[in-house]
Image (cartoon, grey):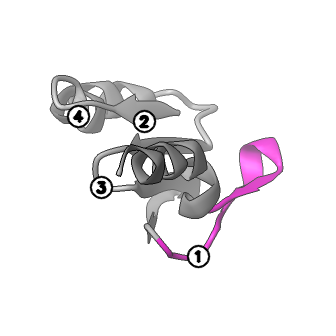
Amino acid sequence: MEVLSDSTAAYDRGIKFAAYRKQADLREYLLVDVDQRRLELYRHAAGHGILLESERDGQALRLESVDMTLSPAEAFEDLDEEARSER
């Protein structure tokens, strides 16, 4: 899992992800985009990669490699509560 920032997003999606894809045992790679409140799950299955995305109020994603389900609402709950309290 990588939490993206303005300074690392291009690297995490590009060079780093390319290096991870070379790992034979890589099953999933989750990118967490805090600014967009978006989850991007790349899954290696049946010899190819699959991209699953979920934004703000979107569906939960199933992370099979760690037997976990995560929705954007859960992932960003603390950040959203903090933003509401600052208003």
Badge 1 crowding class, 10 Å Cα cut-off, few under 14, some 14 to 19, many 20 or more, is: some
Which x, y percent locates residue 12?
A: 29, 30
| Label 2–label 3 contact, CB within 8 A | no
Q: Quadrant of residue 8?
A: top left
- Mark 1 residue type: Gln
Front-most of 79 and 28? Answer: 79
Instruction: For mark 4, give the secondary structure.
Output: helix
Front-most of 47 and 57? Answer: 57
**Image side of residue 37 versus residue 36, left or right:** right
| Label 2–label 1 contact, CB within 8 A | no
- Please determine whether, in this image, residue 13 is positioned above or below residue 5: below
Badge 4 crowding class, 10 Å Cα cut-off, few under 14, some 14 to 19, many 20 or more, is: some
Q: Residue at x 23, y 34 (%)?
A: 9
Q: Which mark is residue 21?
A: 2
Disc nearest the viewer among 4 and 3: 3
Residue ID for mark 1: 59
- Mark 2 residue type: Arg
Earlier residue among tags 2 and 3: 2
Badge 2 crowding class, 10 Å Cα cut-off, few under 14, some 14 to 19, many 20 or more, is: some
Residue ID for mark 4: 9
Disc nearest the viewer among 2 and 1: 1
| Label 3–label 1 contact, CB within 8 A | no
Disc nearest the viewer among 3 and 1: 3
Earlier residue among tags 2 and 1: 2
| Distance CA(mark 4)–CA(mark 2) | 17 Å
Q: Is residue 34 visible?
A: yes
Q: Residue at x 51, y 76 (%)?
A: 58
Instruction: For mark 3, give the secondary structure.
Output: loop
Residue ID for mark 3: 36
Front-most of 75 and 43? Answer: 75
